Structure formats: structure tokens, C-alpha cells
């Protein structure tokens, strides 16, 4: 509300037929300049419902500049942005029950440009948590929550099979429980690399690369559970906390110098969120970890991959955690690769649509947008003439491969950087 | 209306099942236990009935795992009002006859109008807990139910038959229902809510008496054994077709 101004009620105002103020004739129907601006008549209840929540405060700071609208990945395929959400609260839209609540992927491009630091990374989980508590959750997202709660992974796969992927890696993948000794690197594999068929390809590639480099590593196997960060951002904070407690307990059973993770979401969880729950260890995304070993790795990259490759920056590696170079250094180390950048890259990288729960809201989001974010992205890759779309987030391989098919860009090859490195290491 | 939902925990079927050393049952200690899926539907139907007609929902189970509280907290988060745990020396895999007896004794003191339980469970698959509770309490039972509506001291229940047939029964309360499926998918209890409830909820303890003894004993439990083998025929379509025709004749499968 406006501060220090009492509202002028038009019916208390006397209208003068002829009036001259400071030499200026302002005769005529009472000028709206002399009334309260219409904006003060807006009902602020919907806005205050959000801003009264811990984490929701910053939505009230929006002054409508619309810088966020220009960069919001959802607005490109729909009608959406933090500014629009703020505006809609003024015209009667309740974010708690609006479909807008579930479209944000927490990609953080809005926060990057926002002069007022309106922070959707905090606003969305805060409001979503309230919706989750009342059960107002899109069914597909609810299923992912249920599967994660029941099975420790959002794919609903048996916990006992979490390390089964390793059988076909062709190299040893030691499990900490069997190793019974300290390791240099605890490799947190993650749910999609452990269970998704295309994720497993990347996990197996990573295992082969680690072995070739002589890394002393181990995995947790069936003691590993999903990191839960995307579920937290989708509003299930309790589920995140439960998983964090279980994972931290599992990590605490073993000695290791550093953790390496396959996925950027896990990287974000362990680096920025788990320390709030008592975790205390160093963590690196595999791209940075492998760059550290590039002197040893480079001579092994013998087989040229003579293709035009573009790279999709994962939101949670790039914008959220500032890592743009490591993936590119790895790609440049592969002989034959011609690296081309898409228009939306690095700090302004487009979002695949998988973050913040978007991974489990595909049908829901599809109903409210003209095309999937992943479909927009593969079109962009194709527009730049890329033959390969390289990724380093386990959410992305399946998203982009599906999108390549659904948009008729079947020729676009989608590969994790791990797979490309592994391919180049083959004789 | 006083609604009571007896529940039980069973091995998680998404895990690999292990046979015990005697070869007479599952290796229960090696298994994760979860709430029986049909009981999840019974809880949902109970909460729906309460929301439609008022009353209280009490969820009750025999604590065979030491982990029943988690299931009870989840039920409370879904809308149940009270929770009770039957305690005693009842290990994992306690048979359905014993569980039914313990549950019936505990439920009798709760004077229920409606008892909703899962029609069966994936552990023993005998579907006996519901009917036996009804028998112990002297109440009518309808099983394989996919919807319950309560009005004027009576329940209208929808029962599923084979071949897509449905039956509608009007039953005087109190009664026992074996729920096949709630008329809505079971709601999700957010872990956030379950954790809040776990901090404050009071669970009543009821001391269980003796085991009743199973109605049947398992002599041998084993994983499916491969029997026979498949022979793969190679060759072109005509060649293979001739082989198939010859085999059909050889086996005497042709009439006349």
C-alpha cells in the first residue's frame, strides 16, 4: 500500500466548473490527476498471501520493469514471467490455485536480471509448499513425490536395483559397503544415471573414464537415495529433509576426500542445501573434476568425433553455481569436435524445462504452453546447425531426445559429455 | 459415524524377494515393509466417507515391524483422526488369522459403525482378514468393493464381479467392507505434513493377546523354476511354416 497517503474519496471532492490553479486553467470534468491513482484501488490480498510467507516476501518488491519477461524461458513458449505473476495478483489471480504456480522451472534467469531481486527460487517453493500441504498438486508431480518417498527415487524403481546399471559398465564400480576402506572420491551417481536407460549410458561412460584415469572411487549403491532438491523446489520440503537426513547418514558412514556428482541438481543440493542440515564435505560436478584431470585425460582422447557440437548450459550448473567453462573445456579437448554456441548460452542459457519439478510436470506444462521448453531448445540447436547437442545434466538426455523426435529433428544427436569422452577414448 | 480401518504392512514388492533358510517363507528381516496397497485404498475410502457423512476415522494395525507408526502417521496426514497400535510379540509375516483375531478384539471395544479394510494383501493373498474380523464381531461383510456411501444407518456398497459386472448392496450398519479400490485414487500425504504430525500425534497402544495360529501352513516357498525350454527355429517363412505344420500334426492337434 502507498505509504503516508490517505485515500481521497471522489464523493468528498467538490467539483469546480471553472478553476485556475497557479495561473493554469484546469476547468472541466474533475481530472483524474487529482484523484488517487487507480493502482491504489487494487486488492492486495492475493499479493500479501504470497509476501507474508517466509521466502515469498520479494514478490512484493516487483516494480513492473519486465526485464524478467524478456528472459523467462516459459514466456517464450507461453505467457509467463515473475512480473506477470506479480501483476496478476493485483487483478484477482490467486497464485496458490493458479496454474502459474507449477510452470516456473526455477531456472533463475529472471533473478539474474531483476533490479529488485525478486527471487522466484524462494517464492515458488514457499507457495508450492502450502499447495502441497493442502493436496492441490498436479497428479504427475504427486506421483513423483510418492515414488521418491516410497522408493528413494522419482522414477519409482526398486531401491535394491540402484546399482544394477554398473553390471554392464565393463569396468569395476566399487561399492563402499563392500570396499570397507576410505576412498579418494565418493561418486554420487544420482537417480536418473542409476535407473533411466539413457542415464545409465552416461553412468557407465563415467565409470569407464574414472577407471581409465585411475581414480580411487566408490559409490553408495543401494545406500544412495535421490538428493531431493528438485522435490524441494517443487514444494515438498519435508520429503527433501527426509532424504537429506538419510543421505547425510549414508555419507557419514564412509571416509572420502571429496564427492563427485553426475548431476547439477545434486551438485546444487550438496553444495548449497545439505550444509544447512549438517553435511560437511567438498563436492564437485564431474565436469570440473575431469577438467582437473585433463592433462591425463587428453592423451586418451584419440578417436576424433568429426561433428558440429553445441552445448546446453544446465541452469543448476551455470546460473545457479557459476560453472560455464568446465563443460566447454572438456568438449574442446575432444579431437574433431567443432563447438558452436547457440544464441541463448552461458548466463542467458535456455532452460530444458526439467528443473524445479518440471521434470515431473511434462503433461501439465504442455497444456499451458505452445511447446515444451525442451522442444524450443532442440529447435534452437538445429537452427545453429548443430549435429550434436551436448549436455551434462541427467535430466536432459531423455528430455532432448524426446524433443528432437517430436519436433522432427531426429538427426540431432543428444549426448552427455561423458558419452562423448568415452566414445573418443575408444580404440 | 465411527469408522475403523484395520491396516497391515507387507513386504515391498518392488524389492527383490528373498526366501528364508528353511525355504518355507520370505526372509522378512531382509525386506523393506510398506503399507498394503489395498489398505491405502481402505484409508482413502474411509476419509472420503467421513468427508461425505461426518464422523471419525480410527486407523489400527498390529505392529509386526516396529515401523507401524510411520504408516499410522501417514494415515493421520491423509485425514484419519485417531491411530492405534496393537503391541506384543508378533513378528514380521504374522499370519492373517492371528492378525484378524487381534484386530477384531481391539476393534470390538471401539464400537465401529463401519470397518473398512483392504480386500486382500500381497503377502498371503488369502483375503481373509476382512471376513474373519466380520465373523469375530458377528457383522455382515461385503468384499471387492469399489465405493461406499453411507446414509441413514445404512451403507450402499458397490461390489465388483468378474466380467465387468457391478453389484449394488444396501447393508445395515455396522458392517465390514473389503475395499478393492477407493472411488478416488488414494491421496498423497506430503512428507512435510507427515513429519509435522509425527512430532505431535498420539498413538494409542493396545496390548495384543495370543497368536491364533495360521489357518494354513506353507510347506515350501520357492522362486519360479524354469521348466522345459524353447526351441528357436531359423529359416525363411515357408521353411518355418512347414516346421510348424509338421509339429501340429505330430502333436495330434489337428482334428480329423
Image: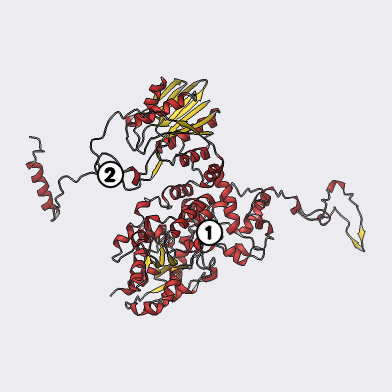
Residue identified by numbered label 2: B19
- Establish if A142 lies above or below B40: below
Q: Are discs 2 and 1 less than 8 Å apart at CB?
A: no
Q: Which quadrant of the rendered structure holds the C terminus of chain A?
A: bottom left
Q: Residue at label 1? A: A278
For the question of whether residue B33 can be seen, the reply is yes
The residue under the point 35% across, 76% down is: A306
Q: Secondary structure at mark 1?
A: loop
**Subunit bearing disc 2:** B
Q: In the displayed structure, does residue A270 sit left or right of residue B224?
A: right
- Nearer-the-camera pick, A33 or A389: A389
Closer-to-camera residue (A150/A255): A255
Q: Residue at x 23, y 35 (%)?
A: B219
- Residue A60 in the figure: left or right of residue A315: right
Query: Are the residues under badges 2 and 1 in a single subunit?
Result: no
Quadrant of the image occupied by residue A417: bottom left
Crowding around mark 2 (Cα neighbors within 10 Å: few <14, some 14 to 19, many 20+) is some
A268 up-or-down from A54: above or below = below
Q: CA distance from mark 2 to mark 1?
A: 39 Å
Chain letter of the residue carrying label 1 = A
Amino acid at each position: 500500500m502507498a505509504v503516508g497517503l490517505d485515500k481521497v474519496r471522489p464523493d468528498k471532492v467538490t467539483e469546480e466548473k471553472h478553476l485556475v490553479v497557479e495561473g493554469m486553467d484546469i476547468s472541466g470534468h474533475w481530472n483524474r490527476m487529482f484523484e488517487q491513482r487507480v493502482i491504489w484501488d487494487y486488492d492486495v490480498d492475493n499479493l500479501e498471501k504470497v509476501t507474508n510467507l517466509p521466502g515469498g516476501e520479494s514478490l512484493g518488491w516487483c516494480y513492473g520493469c519486465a526485464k524478467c519477461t524478456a528472459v523467462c524461458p516459459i514466456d517464450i513458449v507461453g505467457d509467463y514471467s515473475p512480473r506477470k505473476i506479480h501483476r496478476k495478483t493485483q487483478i484477482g489471480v490467486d497464485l496458490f490455485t493458479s496454474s502459474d504456480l507449477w510452470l516456473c522451472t526455477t531456472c533463475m534467469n529472471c533473478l539474474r536480471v531483476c533490479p529488485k531481486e525478486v527471487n522466484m527460487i524462494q517464492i515458488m517453493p514457499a507457495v508450492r509448499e502450502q499447495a502441497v500441504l493442502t493436496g492441490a498438486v498436479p497428479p504427475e508431480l504427486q506421483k513423483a513425490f510418492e515414488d521418491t518417498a516410497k522408493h528413494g527415487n522419482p522414477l519409482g524403481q526398486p531401491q535394491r536395483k540402484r546399482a544394477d546399471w554398473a553390471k554392464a559398465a565393463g569396468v569395476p564400480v566399487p561399492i563402499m559397503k563392500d570396499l570397507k576402506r576410505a576412498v579418494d572420491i565418493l561418486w554420487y551417481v544420482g537417480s536418473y544415471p542409476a535407473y533411466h536407460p539413457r542415464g545409465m549410458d552416461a553412468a557407465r561412460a563415467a565409470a569407464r573414464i574414472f577407471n581409465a584415469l585411475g581414480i580411487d572411487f566408490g559409490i553408495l549403491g543401494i545406500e544412495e537415495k535421490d538428493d531431493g532438491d528438485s522435490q524441494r523446489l517443487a514444494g515438498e520440503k519435508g520429503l527433501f529433509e527426509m532424504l537429506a537426513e538419510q543421505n547425510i547418514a549414508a555419507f557419514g558412514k564412509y571416509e572420502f576426500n571429496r564427492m563427485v556428482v553426475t548431476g547439477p541438481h545434486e551438485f546444487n543440493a550438496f553444495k548449497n542445501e545439505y550444509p544447512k542440515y549438517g553435511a560437511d564435505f567438498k563436492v564437485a560436478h564431474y565436469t570440473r573434476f575431469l577438467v582437473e584431470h585433463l592433462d591425463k585425460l587428453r592423451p586418451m582422447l584419440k578417436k576424433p568425433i568429426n561433428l558440429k557440437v553445441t552445448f546446453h548450459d544446465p541452469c543448476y550448473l551455470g546460473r545457479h553455481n557459476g560453472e560455464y567453462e568446465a563443460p566447454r573445456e572438456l568438449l574442446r579437448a575432444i579431437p574433431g569436435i567443432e563447438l558452436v554456441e547457440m544464441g541463448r548460452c552461458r548466463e542467458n542459457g535456455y532452460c530444458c524445462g526439467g528443473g524445479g519439478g518440471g521434470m515431473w510436470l511434462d503433461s501439465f506444462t504442455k497444456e499451458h504452453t505452445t511447446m515444451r521448453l525442451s522442444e524450443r531448445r532442440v529447435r534452437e540447436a538445429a537452427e545453429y546447425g548443430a549435429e550434436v547437442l551436448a549436455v551434462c545434466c541427467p535430466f536432459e538426455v531423455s528430455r532432448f531426445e524426446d524433443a528432437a523426435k517430436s519436433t522432427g529433428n531426429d538427426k540431432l544427436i543428444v549426448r552427455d559429455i561423458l558419452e562423448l569422452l568415452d566414445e573418443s577414448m575408444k580404440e | 459415524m465411527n469408522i475403523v480401518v484395520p491396516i497391515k504392512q507387507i513386504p515391498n514388492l518392488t524389492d527383490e524377494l528373498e526366501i528364508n533358510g528353511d525355504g518355507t517363507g520370505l526372509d522378512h528381516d531382509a525386506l523393506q515393509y510398506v503399507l498394503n496397497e489395498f489398505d491405502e485404498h481402505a484409508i482413502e475410502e474411509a476419509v472420503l466417507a467421513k468427508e461425505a457423512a461426518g464422523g471419525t476415522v480410527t486407523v489400527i494395525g498390529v505392529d509386526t515391524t516396529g515401523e507401524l507408526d510411520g504408516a499410522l502417521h501417514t494415515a493421520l496426514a491423509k485425514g484419519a483422526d485417531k491411530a492405534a497400535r496393537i503391541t506384543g510379540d508378533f513378528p514380521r509375516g504374522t499370519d492373517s488369522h492371528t492378525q484378524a483375531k487381534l484386530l477384531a478384539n481391539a476393534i470390538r471395544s471401539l464400537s465401529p459403525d463401519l470397518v473398512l479394510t483392504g480386500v486382500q494383501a500381497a503377502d498371503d493373498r488369502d483375503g481373509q482378514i476382512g471376513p474373519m474380523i466380520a465373523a469375530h464381531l458377528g457383522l455382515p461383510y461385503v468384499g471387492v468393493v469399489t465405493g461406499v456411501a453411507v446414509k441413514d444407518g445404512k451403507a450402499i456398497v458397490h461390489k465388483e464381479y468378474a466380467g465387468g459386472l457391478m453389484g449394488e448392496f444396501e447393508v445395515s450398519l455396522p458392517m465390514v467392507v473389503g475395499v478393492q479400490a477407493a472411488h478416488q485414487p488414494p491421496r498423497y500425504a506430503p512428507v512435510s505434513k507427515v513429519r509435522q504430525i509425527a512430532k505431535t500425534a498420539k498413538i494409542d497402544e493396545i496390548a495384543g493377546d495370543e497368536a491364533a495360529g495360521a489357518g494354513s501352513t506353507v510347506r515350501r516357498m520357492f522362486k519360479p523354476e524354469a521348466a522345459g525350454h524353447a526351441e528357436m527355429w531359423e529359416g525363411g517363412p515357408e521353411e518355418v511354416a512347414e516346421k510348424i505344420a509338421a509339429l501340429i500334426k505330430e502333436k495330434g492337434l489337428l482334428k480329423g
